[in-house]
Amino acid sequence: MKPAEIEELIKKLHIEPNAEMYGRTLTDTLKAQEIQKKLAASRPNLWRFIMESKVTRYSAAAAVTLAVAFVLLGPFGTPGNDGVVLADVQKKVAGIETMVLRGTRTFTYPGEPDRIFEFDGIKYKFDIVKYHSTQYGVVEEGYAEGELIYRATLNIPEKQTLILFPKYKKYLKFASMDAIAKVMEQVSTPNGILNLLFAGDCKELGRDKIDGVEVEAFEFQDTEPFEPIKELLPKAIFDIQTFRAKVWIGIKEQLPVRVEGDLAIGKCLISLFHDLNLHEVDTFGEYNIELDEDIFDTNPPEGYTEVTLSDILKVIPVEAKAGLVGLGIAPAGFVFWRRRKRKTAAVSRN
Amino acid sequence: MVEDKILIWRFKRGSRDALQRIYEKHIVYLVTLATALLNDVSTAEDIVHDVFVSFAQSAGKLKLKGNLKAFLATCVVNRVRDRIRTRQRQPAPLDEANSICSKANGPELSAVCSEELQKLSRAMAQLPYEQKEVIMLHVYGGLMFKHIAKSQQVSINTVQSRYRYALDKLRSLLNSEIAK
């Protein structure tokens, strides 16, 4: 008998466990998992830790806002098939060092796709530009009617996040907590996004052509890829009710060409306590171009002041204020004290 | 590989279905591996039972870098070693050993064990434990020598030597059986 034959024989070894052992082990294994889940639930969770500090509360809320943006804008991958091969897409995406994405993001009311959500005079229909560097981080700029409304920078090496609001000359800056930074890294790196999407159900939509490029389209319809984010924050902060994304991958290039995402968001802090739909369309094209390190700078520009709790309370609706109190983000006394102060001022003016 | 990645991802988030799928997918492989190492089906089943129970408890802290099959195989091998150490004995010697096939406690096994496999299992029972572990992990489990070396805390050359000795011994044992 030759070594190769012996090896083949070893590979054929096959022992079926008896039925009693099979059933008992499975039952005990599943029972152990249930006990473990109960134990984990009784431990203090990350959310409680976040909510204990004002800084981390803001950080978490801001991080999630960015995370949604990054997930929707990221280059997606899909399970393999005849035209688009998963391994090739993965390899290509893993090789992306930098990219620039452009698209639009629109918030509308459910059932009214033409009614754009408006807040403080700003229509929530943004033209988006996103700069991504695996080395430095991510920058996203949101423009409404040509005006820069926000600029968010996540600097990965410095673990700092800066969000600028040019209209108000305000900024929000915070150090990313390790847990948040980890989630951000997961959802903002191409490979992280791939891994998240692998967990979702995927439907093949067939071939198409976009700007002369032959593509294959896929649809993801599952909220599961967002589970890591949802684990970090409860529904009151960020309530993703449904999630759907279509991705078009160039057959020859084996890279994403276009992505379209739809999220239904329930009443929560992120949607300022409105039920909203988010629709986003992005096109890809600029991969591995040179990006200057300076654009990932997280130092606030001159003339900007930090966002405070009173700034937030000034601009959000009463319903949202009640929501903030309910969440423990704003103390009830603080909200009512400010209302009383305004009332007193009005009385004294009269 | 991708399926395992998804299963692990879901398992870590508490999915019962994922755990059940992992179990169904790997149970036969692990029972076979443990039985081949111990020459004792019931102890092998106990070990696999314990491996799955502690795997289920590890969801929160599981950090899996390699593949799931190799991870579970390593868990089984570690427990087999512990069992052998605590009993202060090697697996049953040749004359007492029940071959993997003859020890089968269900009709399923005898059906799948051909005469050739029975000869193999008798020959395997005569290998020193370290050699048997190397040959099972490499050939049956598909683990690379460097991973086995790490698990056994020996050099890769030692693992390769054990593999060669094991194959040589198996060949001579099987050929002598055929000659009979």
Image (spheres, coloured by chain):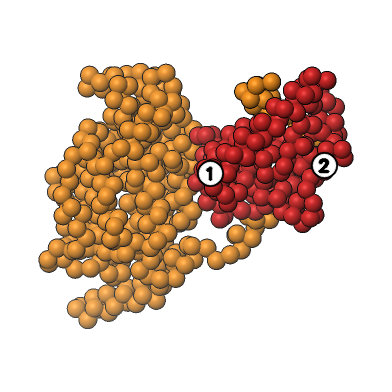
Chain colours: A orange, B red
Residue drawn at the location 48% of the way across and 62% of the way down: A47
Give the structural element (helix, strand or loop) at label 1.
Answer: helix
> Circle 1 marks a residue in which chain?
B
Question: The disc labelled 1 sits on which kind of residue?
Answer: Ile
Q: Residues within 10 Å of mark 2 (few under 14, many from 20)?
A: some
Quadrant of the drawing holding the C terminus of chain A: bottom left
Q: Quickly name the residue at label 1.
A: B156
Residue A246 visible in this rendered orientation of the protein: no
Image disc number at residue A181: none
Residue drawn at the location 24% of the way across and 54% of the way down: A153
Residue A123 coordinates in the image, percent (x, y): 23, 47
Give the structural element (helix, strand or loop) at label 2.
Answer: loop
Residue A125 coordinates in the image, percent (x, y): 24, 43
> Circle 2 marks a residue in which chain?
B
Which of the marked residues, 2 or 1, is nearer the chain's N terminus? 2
Q: Are marks 2 and 1 on the same chain?
A: yes
Residue A241 coordinates in the image, percent (x, y): 46, 44
Residue drawn at the location 47% of the way across and 67% of the way down: A49
Q: CA distance from mark 2 to mark 1?
A: 27 Å
Task: Report the front residue among A77 and A266.
Answer: A77
